[in-house]
Amino acid sequence: MQRHINKVAVLGSGVMGSRIACHFAGIGVQVLLLDIAPKELNDAEKKKNLSPESPAVKNRIVNDALQAAIKSNPSPVYTKDVIKRIKTGNFTDDMKRVADVDWIIEVVVENLDIKKTVFEQVEKYRKPGTLITSNTSGIPIHLMTEGRSEDFQKHFCGTHFFNPPRYLRLLEIIPTPHTDPAVTDFLLHYGDLYLGKTTVLCKDTPAFIANRVGVYSIMAIFHIMQEMGLGIDEVDALTGPVIGRPKSATFRTADVVGIDTLVKVAKGVKDNCPNDEEAAIFDIPSFLQKVVENNWLGDKTGQGFYKKTKGEGGKEILTLNLQTMEYGPKQKPKFASIDAAKPVEDLKQRLRMLAAATDKAGQFYQAFHARLFAYVSHRIPEIADDIYKVDDAMKAGFGWEIGPFESWDLLGVEASVKLVEEKGLTVAQWVKDMLGKGIKSFYKAENGKKFYYDVASQAYKTVPGEGEFIILENFSNNIIWKNSACNLIDIGDGVVCFDWKTKMNTIGGEVLEGLNKAVDRAEKDFRGLVVGNEGTNFSAGANVGMIFMLAAEQEYDELDMAVRLFQRSTMRLRYSSIPVVVAPHALTLGGGCEMALHADKVQAAAETYIGLVELGVGLIPGGGGTKEMTLRASLEFKEGRIEEEPLKDYFMAVATAKVATSGFEGFDMGVLRKGHDEITMNASRLIADAKRSVIALADEGYTKPVERTDIKVMGRSALGALLAGVYAMRFGNYISDHDQKVANKLAYVMCGGDLTEPSFVSEQYLLDLEREAFLSLCGERKTLERLQSVIKTGKPVRN
C-alpha cells in the first residue's frame, strides 16, 4: 500500500517524547503529544482554585514538558513557528484521538508493564493499518506485542531515536518476528528521506547495535584507564576530536547522557548477554559505583565527572579525581604523539600516526583498538548480519567520524589481528577465514560505489542504498584536477563536484584557484557544477590568518588583489554558462555563505548554520556578500514593501553577524531564497541532491544570466535612518565604538554611498564600494586586534 505520514501521535512527553514530537513538527507533520494526567493539584493550581478535572491541570505534565523542550539549548526545532503543529492532551481524555493518526510512537517510561498498559489503551482506538512503534532503548521489542491483535503485531516495530533527536542522526529500526517486512522497509526509507536519519536495521538483542558497542567502548576505556593509571582529563584528551570523536569524548559524554543511564545499559548487557565473551568489561568499576551512590549523575544533577563552579574569574570547570573523589582544576594533558598529530588535517593519516606511536598515548590506542576490533568481530552476526550496520550505527549514534570496521581497515586488518592476539584477545573466526581467502579489507570502493565484505556469502556486496548517496571518497579515481587543497571530481552524468579540505574548510588562495578552475572545466566539458564537500563544516569563511598577515604588514596592494580575486570568484559562480549548485552544511560562515549567495541554486542540509559574520571581526563581507544582500533588498522593493523595510532587515542580518540555526531559518534571514533554494533532511544525500538539482537546471535549458545594472539603492534617504539606528544601539551600550564604525561603513555601502536620491546602480559599483570599505577597515587597529584574537583563541575580542 502507498503509505503517507500526515499526523503522528507521540505517547509520553519526557525528554525524548517531547523532542521527537518537535522533530516531526519540524519536518511539517501534525503531532499529537499525550501524557498522563496528574493525580494531585500543585500549589499554583490550588491558588487559582482549579479542579483536578480542569484541562489546564490535566494537561499540565505534557504542556510543561513541551515548554521545557522548546526552551532547551540546543533548540529541538528548526524554527519556532513549527510548534503550532503540536497539539497536546492526556491519556485519560485524548487517547481516542489516536484514531486519526498515521503513526503512533510510544515513549513512556522504561517499564514493560506500563508499556503494555498503554498499548492496551491504544488498541481500543487505533485504526487497523496504523503504524505503532516503541522508542525503548532496552526492553526486548517482541515482549511488547504479547496479547495484542494480529494487525497490531503486524504493524509494530521498535524505532529507537537517539537524544537529542534533531541532532543525533541514528534511528535504529528493530522488527519483531511478526512485523510485516513492508512496514520495516517503509520505516527505513521514511526515517532516511524525511527524518534525515541514518536508519539501521537491528536485531532484537540487548542494547541493539549502537549502545551495545558504544557502552562497551566506554567501559573498556574505563578499564584501560585504570590499568594505565590515567586521569579523566587525559582520557578525554585521547578520545575526542583528535581521533574523530565528539568534543565530549568519554567522560563528558557520560555526564551529558547521564551516568546512571550508562550504568543501567552496562548492567543490562551484563545481565542479559551471558554468552558475551567480554562480559567482565561490563562490571561496574568502584569509582563508577561511587559517583552513582553520591548522586553525581552528570548534567542532570549539576555534577558528575565534571563540575561547573563560579569563581572570581567567572565560570570554572573542575574535574573529579577518581582516587580521592574530590574535584580539582582541569589539567591540560601533554602527549608527544598528540602534539605531533594535531596539525595533521587528514583524520585517517592522524589515526595511523597515533596508533603507531610508542608513548603512553600510543599504548592507550593500541590497547583500545585491540579490544574494540575483537569485540565488534564477535558481534557479527549476533547483533547485525552486516559490518556496515555497525559502522553506520556508531557514526550516527555516537558521532564517530570513522566506524569500527572502517578504523580496522585503516590500521590494516592483518596487522590489527596480530595486535589483538598480542593483547591476549581473539578475533572471530570469520575474520580469519576472510584473510585466508586473500581478502585483506572489509570495504572497497569502485566506480563511485562502496562494497562491504558479506560474512554469510564470503564475498563483497554493494552497500544498500548507494545509488541514493554520493560519497566523494568513493570517487577517488575520478579526480580530474587537483591542487594541495582541492579536488575536482567527475561524479557522473555530466556533473563535476568541487571539493576542498583545509583547516575548518577556510577559503584561501588555493581554494579560489580551484574554484575558478572548476568553473572553467565545467563550462568546457560538463553540464554543470556542484560546490560541496564532506568536511565537518562546509566552510568557516575566508582565511583570517592571511587577511591579518597582509593587513598587519600593510600590504594593501596584495590585500586589494586578494579581495578582488574573491569577488571575481563568487561572481564567476553567478555568471557562468553552466548551472552551479552550492551544497552547504554545518558551519557556512562569511566567505562560505558568500559562495552560497552567488549560486544558481542552494541545496542546503537541514543542519546548516549560515550567515555573514564579518562584522564580528571588525570587517564587512568583502567577497560579494554585502553587494548581494543589497541586491536582495532591492528585489524586495519591487514586491511592494516600503522601500526602507527590506533594506533594514538585510542590513540588520549582516550588522548583527546573525547566523541561522538551521537551513530553514536561512530562509527567514534572506540568505536562502524561498521557493527557489531547497533543504535536504539527510546530510548523506546532500551531494546527490545537489547533483540532481544541477541536472534539472540543465534540462530546463539553463542560460547564462546577465549581470545586474538595475539595483535600486536609497542613498541619503535610507542612510540617515540606518546611521541613526546604529547610533541608538551605541547610545544604549549594545555595541562598542568600533562596532559602530564598522556598521556605519556597512550602511554606507548598502545605501549605495552618499547619493542625493534613490538610484539604480550595477553590481560592480557595489562591489567597488564593498572592497573599499573592507580595505579601509583592515587598516583599523581594533580590527587587527579582533583578527589576531580569532587566530589565537578562535573568538574575536570585544573592543
Image (cartoon, rainbow, N blue to C red):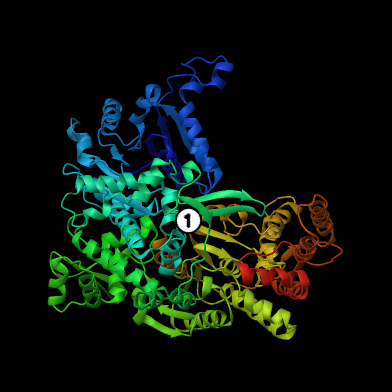
Quadrant of residue 260 in the image?
A: top left
Identity of the residue drawn at 39% across and 72% down: 360
Kind of element beneath mark 1? loop
Point 73% across, 51% down: residue: 645
Q: Nearer the viewer, residue 600 or 223?
A: 223
In the rendered view of the protein, which quadrant contains the C terminus?
bottom right
54 left or right, relative to 356: right
State the residue lying farthest toward the front: 324
Q: Is residue 193 above or below residue 411?
A: above
Residue 340 left/right relative to 764: left
**Of the pair 369 and 597, the residue shown nearer to us:** 369
Q: Residues within 10 Å of mark 1 (few under 14, many from 20)?
A: many
* Amino acid type at image mark 1: Ala
For the N terminus, give its image quadrant.
Answer: top left
Residue at label 1? 606
Q: Position of residue 162 (x, y in %)?
A: 38, 49
User: At which x and y percent is residue 99?
Assistant: 33, 29
- Which of the two residues, 306 or 142, is positioned nearer the viewer here? 306
Q: Is there any visible trace of residue 769 in the rendered image?
A: yes
Q: Is residue 543 left or right of residue 441?
A: right
